[in-house]
Image (tube, coloured by chain):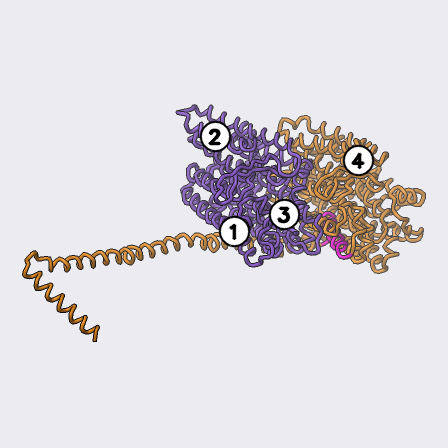
Chain colours: A purple, B orange
């Protein structure tokens, strides 16, 4: 069942590519139906999940190096797989009216969906790594093939090389874990149970360094984030939504899935580094975003800010000495919630940025002004997304950030206290952006002052609705995440 | 009866959200939906106050979402619901465009205030608290074409959110202490965590209540529509800052420094903003400064143990100030101006408004037997027990409230001059009309301003304390009440007589330059820092990364040259050497036997010589 969930999109992608000259409408509908079926399938898996590792698949893959095709779902991966399915489905709906060469675009996105779901389901480091690298290749093709702007190829190459080098660091770390384990294995559950580098200080530190850098590039955190703004600026809207909504989570997910439980001793020793990197990313991302003139670049930098909160939380969860495990579990629960929340909200914001570009031909905010009168629905959606992103209670961002702050304050009071300023800065930058785009005297010269269309609303409104639902009724999601977060806290404390 | 409590919050929230998102199509129905929802909310509030329900559901990790109507909340929800209804009725006549958005945002705002009032845990409180701030942004910046109003809304949101960070801090400290996030549990927290919680709560409350040094946001907020000022800056948003301290008075008392800080901040705000209010030339600015000053008395009451007095003052002030803001708004709509000089005689031109305005101003002045006279004396009685210097400062502040009330009253009640119309229409074109929608709420509020001293007067005061469930507080003596009442009458009369001659210097009109100081001290440095970091990001960090690529290419070129010239050259040279050696080796191959013999002889001779050399 799980393998079907992972590979069905890729199979459909192959069928689409082999289908000689399909009509565009048919391609779009196939794409929407398949990604919708994925959402339904994840919902069914969620409903049937009852704790521990569910839906496990485990067969030998490359026996020579002890690598197995091992998949399974738990409270960390299931929310992210749900997020992945939803974001891809909304991109499919959004793309119904956008983009050229729809057959290849749809096939590429379906293949990308397989890599993303596969990564979150993976329970073997080599399987994880393969999906990790394939996602980079897929996103490279999206930016290089469908990006706009003269720099698209260059940005795509920068994205590819930077994150690919990051993935090599990750591979080095994985090999370190493999060699330390006895018997040698890439199996995540076995490595987690063994924690093979506990008691080997230097080696543990070096392996953590390799894995940490690899994940930090992908997340991205300061100072490894500079590939993100150009990649986003030049990527097509749906590509940006997937990149920010899903691909960034691979980095933060890796911290919770690999770095913390497999290297608990090293993580505890260097957790303060994660706290510092997190706090710096929070403030730096927000401040640099405040200075941006391009709407899309601004959103890209707020991603650095939002991912910084997650680093703060995972770092605080490693500061074990003399702190309350309950508080640390709250911080980690907040971190996973933040991944889901950021995926939904930023996905919506990037789709909205795509609409802005399509209508106005530029992301520069000063080229607009007073749009609220002419495009009320576009304005309403963007205002809601902006307030959701600045962490207003009632939206998922508040649930995430409140838990991160409240949980991190005990272990890391100074870091959490400083990082709090981030939510003030994001409030300022989003309000300022709304003023420049929508309010004030009318300054825009839209050739086609068209408001959002029905299918665009159908793509964006569900993302924001889910954010509101999580913001008001967080329990179903938190009931799933909390046991897993407690589990990670226990594993780190070993 | 828990359904009453849930509906109390969700009904206005849902109705408001539907209206606000309904777009222009909802405009026609908006006033009716708004007023009927507000009326239903008032009924629900009365029901909740009567039945005192409490609800709790699991919410975030480590804390429940709990609402509870205790005595203090019961009184406050009824006051908030009543003022909201009256303000919305007034808005039917006053707000002409963007009605769906206006009534929608107002209802969401009311829901957030009711949530804040009934919240029993920190996450629930924060939810209401921050949504209140966000909707206040939308309401103050309601006329969104105007950059000044946008800036005013932004200032209000960001300044109060700066204070809100204190509540996040408090939640973190409470969780770190291992206790729950219930508001009642905060006072029992151990050691240093309780101090952090108190500091966080204090910051949040002072920010919302527009106390010093945060007061400036309230000045700018006066650019918002008058009904917004009437609700947000009397009964609801600013009042919630005072309300939070009343609710958590035990926490303040348990951390002595927090109580002392709150008391002094409250008293000094009452004093300084009182001076600022006297020195205004704009009616709404005068009322705004007086709001901050009056909230100072509420904060003072919460900090010095005068909780019942503070609560009574909060409610009396809500009715009084809503009345005054609505009257000012009625004149603004009719005459198009807020300037005190231009409003000279406005109370005679619109007599009904003049009469109720007078009732409000006399109450604000603290003249017996109206609302704020008795409630303020209750606060002062507690203050006297707490500290004498504080009492003296508050007494002066009380006299100042008579001065600014008198200034406004003296001007609007003076005879109308013939050249008055020349001063009109400074803000907007006036309608020269005040309708029944506007007059009726004013009269109801005037009744409140006249009667709301009762909770602070002896027969009712004791049962009011029991209703609130707070410890009995020292009550004002007859002498003290006569003294403060007499002082208020004298100052009021003097101020009324001198009203046109009271100065309005630049420093009071600029609210002591607080906003400019915040701009210079915080906003501009942050913007400069952000631009600097953005430049750093592009020119240093990104360039360093991008330099790796050319460096990689150059290294590759070096290796390519090494490969071409070095490695490949070596191979080529070896090949050439081998070829030359081969050519050399061809020379002996002549094919002539005698030459082979000769070569053999030479080789044998050489071998023999070698052998001889080796053997010897």
Q: Label 1's element?
A: helix
How many angstroms separate mark 4 from mark 1 (CA)? Answer: 72 Å
Rendered image: mark on residue B82 = 4
- Sequence-wise first label, 2 or 1: 2
Rendered image: mark on residue A11 = 2
The reply to whether dot 2 and dot 1 touch (C-beta < 8 Å) is no
Q: Chain of mark 4?
A: B
Q: Quadrant of the C terminus of chain B?
A: bottom left
Label 2 packing within 10 angstroms: few (<14), some (14-19), many (20+): some
Rendered image: mark on residue B494 = none
Image position of B406 (left or right of A48): right
Q: Label 4's element?
A: helix
- Disc 2 or disc 3, which is closer to the eye? 2
- Sequence-wise first label, 3 or 1: 1
Residues beneath discs 4 and 1 located on the same chain: no
Where is residue B164 shown, x and y percent of the image?
69, 48
Residue placed most toward the observer, B412 or A79: A79
């Amino acid at each position: 069942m799980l393998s079907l969930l992972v590979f069905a999109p890729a199979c459909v992608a192959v069928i689409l590519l082999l289908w000689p000259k399909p009509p565009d409408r048919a391609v779009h509908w196939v794409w929407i139906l398949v990604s919708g079926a994925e959402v339904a399938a994840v919902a069914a898996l969620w409903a049937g999940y009852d704790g521990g590792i569910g839906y496990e698949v485990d067969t030998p893959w490359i026996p020579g190096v002890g690598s197995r095709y091992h998949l399974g779902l738990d409270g960390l991966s299931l929310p992210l797989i749900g997020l992945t399915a939803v974001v891809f489905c909304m991109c499919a709906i959004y793309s119904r009216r956008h983009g050229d060469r729809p057959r290849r675009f749809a096939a590429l996105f379906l293949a990308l969906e397989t890599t993303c779901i596969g990564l979150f389901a993976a329970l073997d480091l080599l399987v994880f790594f393969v999906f990790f690298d394939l996602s980079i290749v897929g996103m490279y093709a999206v930016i290089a093939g469908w990006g706009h702007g003269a720099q698209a190829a260059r940005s795509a190459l920068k994205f590819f090389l930077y994150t690919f080098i990051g993935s090599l660091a990750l591979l080095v770390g994985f090999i370190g874990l493999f060699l330390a384990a006895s018997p040698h294995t890439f199996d995540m559950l076995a490595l987690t149970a063994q924690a093979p580098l506990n008691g080997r200080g230097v080696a543990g530190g070096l392996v953590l360094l390799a894995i940490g850098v690899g994940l930090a590039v992908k997340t991205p955190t300061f100072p490894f984030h500079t590939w993100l703004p150009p990649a986003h600026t030049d990527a097509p809207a749906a590509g940006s939504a997937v990149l920010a909504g899903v691909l960034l989570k691979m980095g933060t997910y890796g911290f919770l899935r690999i770095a913390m439980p497999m290297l608990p001793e090293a993580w505890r020793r260097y957790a303060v580094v994660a706290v510092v990197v997190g706090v710096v990313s929070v403030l730096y991302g927000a401040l640099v975003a405040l200075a941006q003139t391009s709407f899309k670049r601004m959103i890209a930098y707020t991603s650095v800010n939002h991912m910084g909160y997650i680093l703060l939380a995972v770092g605080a969860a490693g500061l074990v000495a003399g702190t309350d495990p309950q508080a640390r579990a709250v911080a980690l629960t907040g971190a996973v919630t933040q991944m889901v929340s950021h995926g939904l909200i930023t996905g919506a914001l990037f789709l909205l940025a795509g609409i802005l570009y399509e209508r106005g031909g530029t992301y520069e905010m000063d080229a607009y002004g007073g749009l609220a009168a002419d495009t009320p629905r576009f304005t309403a959606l963007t205002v809601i997304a902006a307030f959701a992103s600045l962490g207003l209670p009632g939206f998922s961002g508040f649930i995430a950030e409140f838990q991160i702050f409240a949980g991190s304050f005990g272990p890391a009071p100074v870091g959490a206290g400083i990082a709090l300023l981030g939510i003030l800065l994001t409030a300022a930058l989003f309000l300022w952006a709304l003023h420049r785009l929508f309010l004030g005297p009318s300054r825009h010269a839209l050739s086609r002052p068209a408001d959002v269309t029905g299918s665009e609303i159908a793509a964006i409104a569900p993302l924001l609705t889910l954010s509101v639902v999580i913001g008001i009724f967080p329990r179903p999601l938190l009931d799933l995440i909390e046991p897993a977060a407690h589990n990670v806290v226990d594993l780190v404390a070993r | 009866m828990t359904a009453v409590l849930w509906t109390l919050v969700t009904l206005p929230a849902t109705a408001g959200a539907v209206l606000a998102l309904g777009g222009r199509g909802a405009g026609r129905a908006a006033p009716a939906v708004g007023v009927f929802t507000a009326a239903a909310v008032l009924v629900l509030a009365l029901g909740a106050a009567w039945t005192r329900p409490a609800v709790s559901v699991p919410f975030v990790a480590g804390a429940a979402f709990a609402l509870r109507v205790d005595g203090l909340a019961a009184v406050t929800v009824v006051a908030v619901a009543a003022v909201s209804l009256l303000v919305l009725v007034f808005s039917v006549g006053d707000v002409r465009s963007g009605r769906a958005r206006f009534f929608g945002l107002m209802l969401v705002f009311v829901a957030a205030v009711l949530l804040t009032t009934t919240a029993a845990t920190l996450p629930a409180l924060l939810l209401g608290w921050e949504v209140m701030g966000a909707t206040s942004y939308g309401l103050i910046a309601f006329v969104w074409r105007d950059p000044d109003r946008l800036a005013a809304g932004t200032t209000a949101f960001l300044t109060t959110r700066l204070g809100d960070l204190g509540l996040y801090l408090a939640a973190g400290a409470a969780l770190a202490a291992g206790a729950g996030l219930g508001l009642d549990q905060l006072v029992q927290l151990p050691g240093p965590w309780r101090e952090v919680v108190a500091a966080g709560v204090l910051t949040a409350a002072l920010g919302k209540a527009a106390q010093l040094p945060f007061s400036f946001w309230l000045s700018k907020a006066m650019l918002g529509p008058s009904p917004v000022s009437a609700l947000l800056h009397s009964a609801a948003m600013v009042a919630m800052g005072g309300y939070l301290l009343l609710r958590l008075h035990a926490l303040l008392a348990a951390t002595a420094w927090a109580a002392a800080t709150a008391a002094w901040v409250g008293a000094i705000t009452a004093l300084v903003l009182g001076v600022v209010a006297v020195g205004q030339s704009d009616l709404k600015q005068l009322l705004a400064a007086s709001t901050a000053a009056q909230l100072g008395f509420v904060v003072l009451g919460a900090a010095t143990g005068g909780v019942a007095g503070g609560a009574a003052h909060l409610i009396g002030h809500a009715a009084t100030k809503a009345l005054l803001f609505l009257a000012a708004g009625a004149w603004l709509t009719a005459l198009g101006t807020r300037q005190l000089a231009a409003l000279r005689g406005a109370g005679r031109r619109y007599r009904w408004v003049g009469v109720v305005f007078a009732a409000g101003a006399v109450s604000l002045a603290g003249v017996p037997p109206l609302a704020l006279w008795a409630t303020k004396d209750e606060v002062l009685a507690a203050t006297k027990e707490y500290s004498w210097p504080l009492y003296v400062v508050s007494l002066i502040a009380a006299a100042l409230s008579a001065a600014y009330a008198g200034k406004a009253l003296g001007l609007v009640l003076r005879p109308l001059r013939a050249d008055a119309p020349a001063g009109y229409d400074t803000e907007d074109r006036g309608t020269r009309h005040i309708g029944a929608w506007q007059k009726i709420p004013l009269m109801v509020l005037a009744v409140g301003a006249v009667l709301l001293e009762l909770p602070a007067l002896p027969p009712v005061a004791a049962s009011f304390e029991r209703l609130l469930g707070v410890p009995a507080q020292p009550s004002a003596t007859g002498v003290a009440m006569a003294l403060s009442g007499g002082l208020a009458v004298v100052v009021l009369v003097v101020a009324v007589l001198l009203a046109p001659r009271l100065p309005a210097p630049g420093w009071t009109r600029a609210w002591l330059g607080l906003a400019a100081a915040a701009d210079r001290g915080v906003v501009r440095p942050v913007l400069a820092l952000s631009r600097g970091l953005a430049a750093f990001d592009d020119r240093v960090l990104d360039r360093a990364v991008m330099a790796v690529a050319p460096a990689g290419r150059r290294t590759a070129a070096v290796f390519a040259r090494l490969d071409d010239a070095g490695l490949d050259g070596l191979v080529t040279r070896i090949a050439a050497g081998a070829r030359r050696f081969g050519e050399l080796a061809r020379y002996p191959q002549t094919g002539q036997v005698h030459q082979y013999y000769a070569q053999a002889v030479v080789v044998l001779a050489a071998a023999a010589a070698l052998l001889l050399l080796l053997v010897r």
